[in-house]
Image (tube, rainbow, N blue to C red):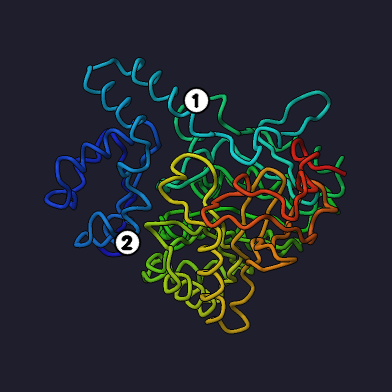
Amino acid sequence: MTAFQKKYKAYTLRNFRTIPQLSGSLSPAEEHAIDVVGHVLPFKVNNYVIEELIDWSNIPEDPIFQLTFPQPGMLSGAHFEEMEQALAQGLSKAELKIVANKIRYQLNPHPSGQAHNVPMLDGQKLTGLQHKYRETVLFFPSNSQTCHAYCTFCFRWPQFVGIDELKFAMRETELLVEYLRRHPQVSDVLFTGGDPMIMSAKNFSAYVEPLLKGNLPNLQSIRIGTKSLSYWPYKFTTDKDADDMLRLFERVVQKGYHLAFMAHFNHPRELETPAVQEAVRRIRNTGAQIRTQSPIMRHINDSVDAWKRMWRMQTRMGIVPYYMFVARDTGAQDYFAISLERAHQIFRKAYQQQGGLGRTVRGPVMSANPGKVQVLGTADIQGERVFSLRFIQGRNPDWVGRPFFARYHPEAVWLDDLEPAFGKAQFFFQEKASGVFQN
């Protein structure tokens, strides 16, 4: 099958055993683990990932396999056993969902205060918006509440498990436009999901055009948060409406807006196929700027070589490396997390091996409840070993760029694991760490 004949095909828990490459690659125990974990955490993969990204001679260690297929360690032993026993009892679909939801609610489904980021307009809760930082509003179109394939680490996994109260989604853009009019401090709108690039060009245009026609002088940038370049680059090359989508990108740019394509690349392998390289070329030709981000994760990319190669490849392709994140405190965090100290060591060594154009990247960054906190390293100050940190973004804009220090903790993997240094009772930001952004 050539690239121009490529047809999208998705596999879920219902039919994953029909994937041809699985035959002989997995043991019955490994297939069983996929079945158990997949009943709690969402699972979806497509033929592009299976045929062009995964190295089936390196299963289960292959990083793309780890990125897309459930693994037994992604649930605690107790949770795995609970779901396993429920399946063994032959419970009904509805009964299995009750068991699964009980486990899901114990996995911190709304990390970093997401539920507190939803704003109001004339007494109406805008469940399809999040406004955590003064200049940026996140918009969750109702038509983007899925992805071409699911990442096993995804902090938005609750969007895909069928619990309506855990979803963020909005059908109408009129409320978004009105909200932007009343909040002139907002300069950026980020389309997210799910994945906005799961939508057809026609559907995505229905969300974008009201912004272009909305007389919004404060709006400067439109961002698209997407994994499509990694999981289905044919979206921008040979899909039937690929050209229509690119023409829409051109219209955004021609209207004077900065179109930022926020691409998620988690491993160098995702940048190597001819399909993704052609898609990147076509998107850049519209005037859109591609930036990249990824968390650093055990089993997938926790090595200097992976990040060094990934950032170098991106720079060569005209892509701007943007963020190295820390795995969020939700879902399978225990499976993926590495210590903050090790994350910084990997970042520093990979960063040192970039040319100046590749040193646009920031990290490692925790996107936590009070804001985006960057780990700058460790130091010895006043006889105490400390982490040096700063806010890149904050609920209170006054926090941004402000350095602070935490007691050194070699096993810390998240902000909540840290304590203030120098005998202080609390960090300066802890009194105001919830709610929509602070003026």
- Vertically, is 354 above or below 94? below
Left or right position of 373 against 338? right
Percent x, y for residue 74?
37, 42
Q: Report whether residue 148 is seen.
A: no
Give whichever of 287, 324 is nearer the camera.
324
What's under tag 2, amino acid-wise? Leu
- Vertically, is 346 above or below 316? above
Residue furthest to the front: 383
Where disc 1 sits, the SS reads loop
Percent x, y for residue 356?
63, 83
Percent x, y for residue 245?
55, 56
Residue under the point 57% across and 57% down: 325
Left or right position of 37 against 152? left
On residue 48, the disc is none
Which residue is labeled 2 in the image?
53
Residue under the point 79% across and 54% down: 187
Give whichever of 69, 272 is nearer the camera.
69
Percent x, y for residue 406?
68, 55
Count of number-bearing discs:
2
Left or right position of 67 against 253? left
On residue 163, the disc is 1
Q: Earlier in the sequence, mark 1 or mark 2?
A: 2
> What's the distance in space between the residues labelled 1 and 2, CA to CA?
31 Å
For the N terminus, give its image quadrant.
Answer: bottom left
For the C terminus, give its image quadrant.
Answer: top right
What's under tag 1, amino acid-wise? Ile
Residue under the point 50% across and 27% down: 105
- Vertically, is 191 above or below 363? above
